[in-house]
Amino acid sequence: MSDLRKVLTLVMAVAMLTVNADPGEPGAWIEGESTALFKALNSPAETDALTARLETTVDFEAISRGVMGKHRDALSDAQQTEFRHVFQSSLTSLLRDGLGSLGDYELDVAKARVPRPGRAQVPVTVTSSDGVYEIQFSLAASDDQWRVRNMIVNGVNLGLTYRNQFAELMRTHDGDVAAVIAGWTESVADSSEIKAGS
């Protein structure tokens, strides 16, 4: 078993490889840059650069809107912005905390599927000492740059998982948005484990 922190470290690290990717060749770009970036991610000096790169690589605004789902109308514009910042901060912190746990790995990037211009799905297999992770990245291109919109890890849809988590917090706190936002980081940290394949 591997906790979500380690899984997110792997998937977000791979996600960062999409910066400035040619929208026509997302898989090839990921494969070509993987080794150098994973080495950079293991350097403690890279944490500030890591945060900055995540901001340009992952579409936190679109993802956080999806996470809020049908409850988004219950949040004011200011609360939506606040949640996006908390959401982004919580995932970045999980990634930072997990960087030291990355060991040897093998990365296999399959051919990307481009269902329509500006959209791509990139299957990636990460083999580490913990097991095998089958990851599918959903990417959207904007201004000739890929940005991550969602990830499915060993069949677990992270976007859907977080949406369900947000909905559960809304139920638990009887629609108290401030309490949901305040409890989000702890809720993410306590997320259930994702099992690696053999």
Image (spheres, grey):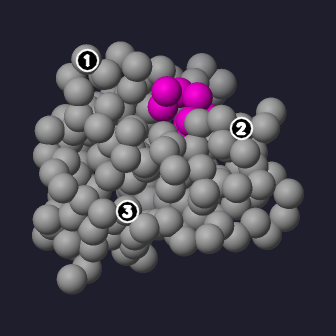
The image quadrant that residue 57 belongs to is top right
The image quadrant that residue 39 belongs to is top left
Q: CA distance from mark 2 to mark 1?
A: 25 Å
Q: Badge 2 local density, few (<14 within 10 Å), some, or many (20+)?
A: some
Give amino acid for label 2. Gln
Return the x and y of residue 136 as percentages of the image width and height. 51, 66
Is the residue 101 above or below the residue 154 in the image? above
Helix, strand or loop for disc 1: helix
Q: CA distance from mark 1 to mark 3?
A: 24 Å
Q: Earlier in the sequence, mark 1 or mark 3?
A: 1
Q: Residue at x 50, y 66 (%)?
A: 109
Give the residue number, with chain letter if any, for mark 2. Answer: 145
**Magenta-drawn stretch, dominant element (helix, strand or loop):** helix
Give the residue number, with chain letter if any, for mark 3. Answer: 107
Label 3–label 2 contact, CB within 8 A? no
Residue toward you, 176 or 146: 146
Give the residue number, with chain letter if any, for mark 1. Answer: 45
Return the x and y of residue 152 as percentages of the image width and height. 47, 66
Give amino acid for label 3. Leu
Q: Nearer the viewer, mark 3 or mark 2?
A: 3
Q: Residue at x 20, y 41 (%)?
A: 98
What span is in magenta?
A: 53-62
Q: Quadrant of the C terminus?
A: bottom left
Return the x and y of residue 107 as percentages of the image width and height. 37, 62
Q: CA distance from mark 3 to mark 2?
A: 22 Å
Helix, strand or loop for disc 3: strand
Return the x and y of residue 164 as percentages of the image width and height. 44, 60
Q: Badge 1 local density, few (<14 within 10 Å), some, or many (20+)?
A: few
Is residue 183 rendered to the left or right of residue 66? left
Label 2–label 1 contact, CB within 8 A? no
